[in-house]
Amino acid sequence: MSAPSKAVLVTGCSSGIGRATALRLAGSGWKVYASARRPETISQLGDAGCQTLALDVTDEQSMRAAVDSIEQAEGAIGVLINNAGYSQSGAIETVPMDAVRRQFETNVFGLVRLTQLVLPKMRAQRWGKIVNIGSMGGRLSFPGGGHYHATKHAVEAISDALRFELRGFGIDVILLEPGLITTEFGEAATASMADTTIAGDDPYATFNTTVGAVTKGAYDGPMRLLGGGPDRVAKVIERALKRRHPPARITITPSAKLTIGMRRLLPDRAWDVAMRAQFPEPS
């Protein structure tokens, strides 16, 4: 039997973790296919040794075309790094349903469908690694981030199920739980609140404004000292891919370890009290 393909497909490479991961792996000798919804945003990755291609994880035809293209060239996708995602902020009642659906299409359904598409050839070669970029937000919930947290809780469950289902085919599933990563993620999360208002005298106006300010402050203020840059996640991915038996779940940055630990220890009502110290309670 020929050696398995170890070609890497990374989604969401226009910035942040995806871009850093593609650059690091390409620099380490991996055959990397870097993708983004708008390929013009990743043209520089081609100069760094990556193959670049268009891939929109909310579009079935786009996903099929990308997978088919790589499989024709490499035989199979050996490593899938599901990184594409963003944060939709705002009180549950105020976020329009089309925005809620976009959040799940990008963060959950795209991840699942792309995984389904790469698995037949990955199983056939009996070797593969799937890296799902989750979040510490999959283990807890902050006020004003309910929809985003719901998607990351879903990624936790999907990763746990996949890990069991795929082990017998020689495929590892690795879930990453980063904390605060200093990328454009915070700005995007704040920008996502632009349309989160309801008609009349909005009872969530002060709350949503504070959620935006707290989110921005986490990325711009002292809290960033407990975070890390996107290359920190890229280094973790590179190490995990080299291991014969990689960890199933990896928590990254002090902010993630501290916050997950605190949530584990606090009863629900005590957690709510801690949240009220940061966010005004809508009333």
Image: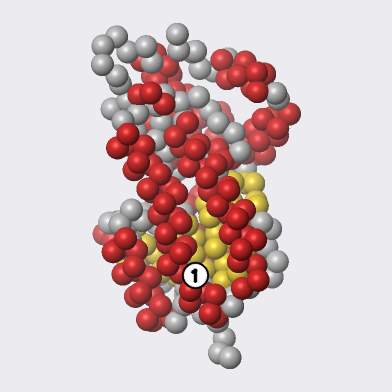
Locate residue 148, reporting x and y percent: 46, 37
Locate residue 119, reporting x and y percent: 49, 70
Answer whether residue 147 is visible to the viewer in this image.
yes
Q: Secondary structure at mark 1?
A: helix
Quadrant where the C terminus lies? top left
Considering only vertical position in the picture, is 185 above or below 276?
A: below
Q: Which residue sits at x=66%, y=35%?
A: 260
Instruction: Read off the residue under disc 1.
Output: 119
Q: Which residue sits at x=29%, y=19%?
A: 198
Quadrant where the N terminus lies? bottom right
Q: Relative to the observer, which residue lies in front, 37 or 171?
A: 171
Considering only vertical position in the picture, is 52 above or below 219?
A: below
The amino acid sitting under disc 1 is: Leu
Residue 258, quarter of the rendered image: top right
Considering only vertical position in the picture, is 106 above or below 171?
A: above
Would residue 90 be found to the left or right of residue 197 on screen?
right
Mark 1: give few (<14), some (14-19) or many (20+) Cα within 10 Å: many
Locate residue 13, reporting x and y percent: 40, 57
Locate residue 171, reporting x and y percent: 60, 69
Colouring used for the render: secondary structure
Would residue 3 be found to the left or right of residue 31 on screen?
right
